[in-house]
Image (cartoon, rainbow, N blue to C red):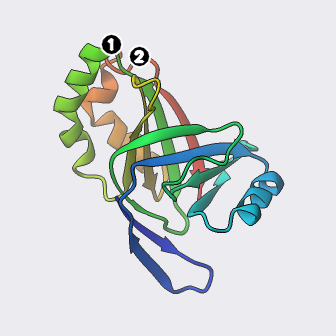
Amino acid sequence: ISYRNYNTSKSIFRRLILLKQFHLTLGSKEILTKVVAQHNDRNFLMLKPFENETDFLLLDFSDLPTVFKAGLSFNLLEGKFELLPNQIYCLDYFSLDTNQQKEFQQSKKQLLEKLSTFVLGQKPKRDFEFLLITNWSQIEDYQYWKSQQDIWQNRDLLNSNYVRYFNS
């Protein structure tokens, strides 16, 4: 996965990380800020809630065992990630049985090829659950992209689709 982050000093920090896993959790800004402070050796990324949502999202791209008590872990399948200002980050969580995973593998390249930034993960113990993180300048761009992808229109394939939005 290629990972680029814009830090607070306005300089661009670039790093290539070969990740096997990433972790995430949701919570209040206060609690997640404490987690970040307690584990300053981690490669955390905190995203703000979108519109009426209250939970912040904390992603851990450090490839170390999780420190989250109530969080999710994913094996990284592929991705290229860039934290950009003023972006909307969309998390699509979906389940695929064995046959659906074969169909998804055939459609995956077309689904991801036009994305400049994404992370695709699969849960290690429940390997039928997947997470796709993408970013967009506006929600309408995401909705348009999704409407143009046959895979998202196939309700038999993506039968448990769940979406959350966050701001950078």
Residue furthest to the right in view is 30
Image position, residue 48 (x, y; %): 67, 55
Observer-nearest of 114 and 68: 68
Mark 1, residue position: 156
The amino acid type, in three-letter code, at marker 2 is Asn
Residue found at x 24% / y 14%:
99
Relative to residue 97, is residue 4 drawn left or right? right
The label number, if any, that marks residue 131 in the structure image: none
Could you classify mark 1 by the number of other residues whose Cα lies within 10 Å: few (under 14), some (14-19), or many (20 or more)?
few
Residue furthest to the left in view is 106
Judged from the image, the secondary structure of the residue bearing numbered disc 2 is loop
Observer-nearest of 154 and 122: 122
Relative to residue 156, is residue 90 drawn left or right? right
Image position, residue 94 (x, y; %): 44, 26
Judged from the image, the secondary structure of the residue bearing numbered disc 1 is loop
Q: Quadrant of the C terminus?
A: bottom right
Residue found at x 71% / y 39%:
69
Image position, residue 128 (x, y; %): 39, 22
Observer-nearest of 166 and 75: 75
Image position, residue 82 (x, y; %): 43, 64
Could you classify mark 2 by the number of other residues whose Cα lies within 10 Å: few (under 14), some (14-19), or many (20 or more)?
some
In the picture shown, does residue 40 fall above or below 58? below
Label 1 near label 2: C-beta < 8 Å?
yes
Report the Cα–Cα distance between label 2 and label 1.
6 Å
Dividing the picture into quarters, in which one does residue 7 lie? bottom right
Dividing the picture into quarters, in which one does residue 71 lie? top right
Q: Quadrant of the N terminus?
A: bottom left
Mark 2, residue position: 159
Residue found at x 75% / y 54%:
32
Residue found at x 31% / y 18%:
157
The amino acid type, in three-letter code, at marker 1 is Asp
